[in-house]
Amino acid sequence: MSFLRKTLAANLCRNPGFIAFLLARLAGMFATQIQAVVVAWQIYDETRDPMALAYAGLLQFLPMLFLSLPAGDLIDRHARKFILMASWGVALLCALSLWSLSSGLLPGGVTGIYFVLLAFGACRAFSGPALQSLLPQIVPRAELARAIAVNGMMMRAASIGGPLVGGFLYAWGGGRLAYAACALGFALGALCLLAVRTPYQGAPATDAGNMWQRFRVGIHFIFQRPVILGTISLDLFAVLLGGVVALLPIYAKEILHVGADGLGVLRSAIAIGEVGAGLWLSLRPFNHAVGKRMFIAVAIFGAANLAFSLSHWFWLSFFALAIAGAADMVSVYIRGALLQFSTPDDMRGRVSAVNMLFIGSSNELGEFRAGTCAGWFGPVVAAVAGSLCTLGVVALWTRLFPRLYGMCRFEEGEQR
C-alpha cells in the first residue's frame, strides 16, 4: 500500500474521482484489448489472408474519420462523463454482438465481425476524445503531469493482462467466453464512471456559429500551435508507417509458429515495456528536455520494431516489442502532457477529437497499411520498411519542428 501511495502521490490518493476514473479506464481498456486480440485471431484463422486484417483496421478507422467533427464539438458542449458512458454502452452492445456471432445465434461469419467493428469504431470516435478531455477536470493542474503518467501506466497494465487473458480465454472457451468478458468489462467501466466527480470544470465552449464553424476554430488553433501540430503529427506518421501490431497474428502463426496464447504474449510484451516505463515515470516524472526526449523515444520505438521485424526467435521478438513499448510509453507521457498544458479547457474536446483522429489514423489505418503491404510484399518486408520509415520521420520532424525538438519544460507549450 505504501508503494502504491508513493506511486500515485498523496494528493491523487485522496481524490476518489481519480481512483474511480482509473478503475473505469482499466475495465474499459481490459475489454478493448481482449476484443482486439480475439477478433484479429478469429479473422486471420478463418481467412489466412493479410488483407482481411487490413480491412478490419480500415473499418474501425472510417467512423472516426467522419465522426470526429461532431464528437469534438459535442464533448466541448456537454458533460464528458455521460458521453463516455454512452459510448461504452455502445461498446457493450458490440461485444454482445460478437458473442452472438461466435455462438451461432447471428449469421455472418467474418462479414458480421466487420459490421460490428464498424460500430465499435463509431463509439471510439466519441470515447477517445471524452477520455482525453475528462482527466483535467478530475485532478488539479499541479498534479496533471503525474496523473497522466499514472493513468498511462495503469492502461498499459491492462494492455498486458487483456491480450494474455484474451488469448487464453479463446484457447480455452472460444470466442463466446472471450466476448462475454469484454461485455463485462465495458459494463463495469460505465458503472465506475458514476462515482467520478469533475470539480475542475473549465469554461464551456462558446455557442457562436454552427458546428462546422466551431470545429474550424479548433483546427485553426492546432495549426497555429507548432507544439500541438508537431506532437500529434509525429505520432501519426511514426505509428502509421512503422507499427507492427497488425502483423502480430501473421508473425505468430507463420514465422514464430505459436498459437493464440503466443499471440497474446506477444501483444502483452508491448504493454510490459509500457508499464515498466510508466511505473518509472510515475515515481520520477521529469520536466526538462521534454522535446528531445520525445524524439529519442520515437527513434528507439522504430529501432526496436526493426529488430522485431527481422527476428525469427520468439523471445527475441518478445524483448524487442517490450523495448518498443517502453519507448512508446515515454513518448505518450510527453505527448499527453504537452497537449494538456497547451490546450484550454473549452477547446479540449475538439483538440482531443483531432488527436484521436490522428491516433486512429496511426493505429487502425496503420493496420490497413501493414496488412496491405504484407499482402503485396510479405510480412517481413512490410515490417522492415515501416520501421525504417519511422526513423526517417523522426529525422525529418526535427527539421520541420525545431521549436518542439528544443522544448525544455511542459509549461512552455502554453506560450507556443
Image: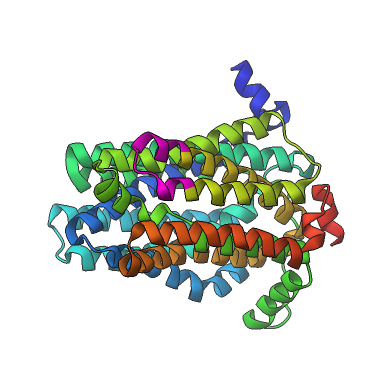
Q: In this view of the protein, which residue sits in the foreground, 135 or 32? A: 32
Q: Is residue 91 above or below residue 77?
A: above
Quick one: 58 or 301, which is closer to the camera?
301
Residue 374 in which image quadrant: bottom left
Residue at 66 percent across and 34 percent down: it is 281
Q: Main secondary structure of the magenta part?
A: helix
Report the colour scheme. rainbow
Left or right: 259 in relation to 239: left
Residue 93 seen: yes
Q: How many marks?
A: 0
Span shown in magenta = 307-319
Q: Residue furthest top?
A: 2
| Displayed quadrant of residue 52 | bottom left
Residue 122 seen in this snapshot: no
Quadrant in the picture for the C terminus: bottom right
From what the image shows, is residue 405 above or below residue 72? above
Left/right of residue 379 with respect to residue 408 in the rendered view:
left
Residue 6 in the image, given as x and y percentages of width and height: 67, 23
Q: Residue 316: within the magenta? A: yes
Look at the picture and state if 352 lies above or below 316: below
The residue positioned farthest toward the right in the image shown: 415
Q: Residue 307: image x %, image y %?
A: 47, 46
197 or 182: nearer the viewer: 182
- The image position of residue 392, as x and y in percent, is 61, 62
Instruction: Residue at 77% x, 66% y: name it.
Output: 226
Displayed quadrant of residue 107? bottom left
Which one is nearer the viewer's eye here, 205 or 180?
Answer: 180
In the picture, the quarter occupied by the N terminus is: top right
